[in-house]
Amino acid sequence: KALKRDEAHEGAMYWSGVAHLYNYQFDEAEDYFRKVVNKRGDYAGKADAKWKLAQKIVRAMPGTPAGKKMALKEKINRADLAVLFAEELKIGVLFDRMPVQNTGFQTPGQATQTANVTVPNDAINHWAETWIKDMIRYGIMDIEPDGNFYPDDTINRALYALAVQRLLVVATRDESIETQYFGEAQSRFSDVPSSHFAYNAMALCTERGIMQVDMMTRKFNPAGDVTGADALLIIRELQTSLRMTF
């Protein structure tokens, strides 16, 4: 009603932008927030933050209902990552398109016809159980030694890089990827030693343009949270890398 009374009222425009954002109408939300920011009024500050989020989501182009929902998350967890890989990266389709070799190799998609997947204790009846099973079946994500998956554990940037590295190894069947950058005398990052457990994965992802570092400080920020929008942007870069591979 406020918007109908005064279409130029910044408060009404801001909340209209919020409504569009959380109804997954990201282009419309971006437009509302941009207009509020340009007014330079009381709502400009928080509108700017929402505008940047909407812009990032539009660039990430979530193509599924699950992806659109995840795009709004301030930080993702292991279950979210399983869903994003399955739905937005479409791992099953990707792997079934892998070239056939004459060595008896089965693609993960072919292997699913005979493979029995153990469901982790804490994934039974979990909302993401189906996607978690897919990631375990494809060898992208693992069950911990205690039989749990820990679906609600937060994924940081280092762990995301490790997941991307594992996916690339499975997709290309090139296990040397996991040690490609081991032994570098000088770290590529100002905040990560080359002895870090995820150093190879971080170097791999930045070398291929899949993940970014701060250009000014050369920091990777391995412990930093991964937002849903950032996770989607990384997936888009990963798709580009995989297209180049195949």
Image (cartoon, rainbow, N blue to C red):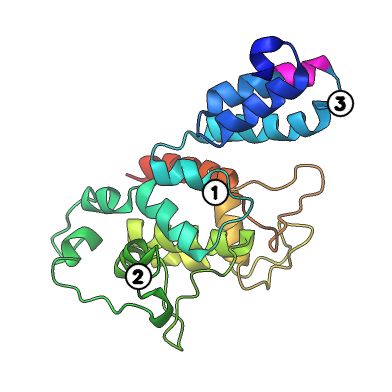
Disc 3 from disc 1: Cα separation: 31 Å
Q: Which quadrant of the structure image shows residue 114?
A: bottom left
Q: Is residue 182 left or right of residue 9?
A: left
Residue shown at 69% from the left, 34% from the top? 50
Residue 226 is situated, as x and y percent measured from the top left of the image, at 62, 54
Q: Which mark is residue 231?
A: 1
Q: Which mark is residue 136?
A: 2
**Mark 1 or mark 2, which has the lower sequence index?**
2
Q: Nearer the viewer, residue 221 or 66?
A: 66
Q: Amino acid at mark 2?
A: Ile
Q: Which mark is residue 42?
A: 3
**Mark 2 neighbour density, 10 Å: few (under 14) some (14–19) many (20 or more):** some
Q: Magenta span: helix, strand or loop, mainly? A: helix
**Mark 3 or mark 1, which has the lower sequence index?**
3
Q: Is residue 38 magenta?
A: yes
Magenta span covers which residues? 35-39
